[in-house]
Image (tube, rainbow, N blue to C red):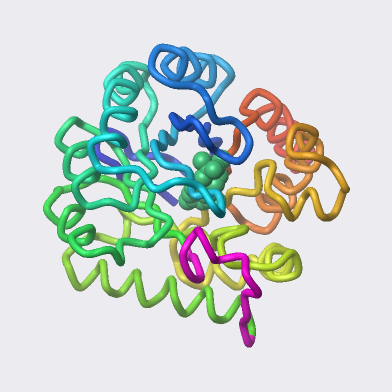
Amino acid sequence: MHWQTTRYIVDLTRPRVMGIVNVTPDSFSDGGRLGAEAIRHCERLVAEGADLLDIGGESTRPGSKAVSVDEELGRVLPVLDAALTLGVPVSIDTTKAEVMRAVLGRGADIVNDINALQTAGTLDAVAAHPNCGVCLMHMRGEPATMQERPLYGDVVTEVREFLDGRLQALQARGIAPERVVVDPGIGFGKSVEHNLELLRRQRDLLALGRPLLVGWSRKSTLGAITGRDVSQRLPASLAAALAAVHGGARVLRVHDVAATVDALKVWAAARG
Ligand code: HH2
């Protein structure tokens, strides 16, 4: 089980930790690190054991402010350049074709798109690259309004069918499946119960034949279960991360790298 990316083939026979670097003023849990501070954060996460980094220049929090291409690139490119020297694959979290083209031209390893390469030009941007990695995430609706009464017949089936359709669209454009991982999109147009159903029946998504990446870190469903504010959701995030790897997830997108690495060590030791 491997993930082809621009510079690295990531071995996913053991679960990997993707450290989140939000270069934004308004992310839901950790905004405010820009420029040199964001670069220091990349270094810290790698020192803590991050296997990959995911750098984002636009928050997807419901109600967050849209940013222009220039603004997003101004935030992300200096951090990308520094992160590319740290010895781990670097992913860029974006939905914009212009941003994808620019970061891939600069050497980014992975494009992480919450819109699953459905925005005009994004499939072309990735197809034009010989071997970058891709994360396709499921989202119902748009970030601004996605949490207003999300409705599904069967959420797991609908997420699986959507991701299957996107995998086929990428393959039809010549993007090899080895380059792609899939993500159910926890909290993106889903109620607490939808998110939990996706966790309980996560193994159904393995039928897609590609590794699963999941992001439970500090999300509001964990707040709904525990009653904790976003700043106090580390124990809940670790429990969700372990439940996810137990259900077959291979990449954990997290804010708290050191704690997640420790939790995974214990999980691996317990499995023998
Ligand atoms: N979650 C967020 C952003 N990007 N990408 C993937 N593939 N999966 C996720 O679950 C995911 C994602 C939201 O978290 P965060 O980046 O911390 O917040 P914000 O969007 O407010 O910057």
Q: Is residue 244 above or below residue 172?
A: above
Could you tell whether 162 is left or right of 189 in the image? left
* Residue at 44% across, 51% down: 1
**Rendered image quadrant of residue 5:** top left
Which residues are the magenta region? Answer: 138-153
Q: Position of residue 82 (x, y in %)?
A: 32, 17
Could you tell whether 143 is left or right of 151 in the image? left
Q: Is residue 37 above or below residue 93?
A: above
Could you tell whether 160 is left or right of 95 in the image? right
**Residue 25 appears in the rendering:** yes
**Rendered image quadrant of residue 31:** top right
Which of 2/29 is in front? 29
Q: Position of residue 221 (x, y in %)?
A: 74, 55
Which of 150/261 is in front? 150
Which residue is at the far right? 227
* Residue at 77% across, 38% down: 233
Q: Position of residue 73 (x, y in %)?
A: 26, 33
Which of 158/3 is in front? 158
* Residue at 28% across, 63% down: 119
**Residue 14 appears in the rendering:** no
Magenta: predominant secondary structure element?
A: loop
Numbered label tally:
0
Could you tell whether 71 is left or right of 17 in the image? left
* Residue at 33% across, 53% down: 95
Q: Position of residue 99 (x, y in %)?
A: 24, 43
**Residue 152 among magenta residues:** yes
Which of 99/185 is in front? 99
Q: Quadrant of the C terminus?
A: top right
Which residue is at the far left? 128
**Residue 16 among magenta residues:** no
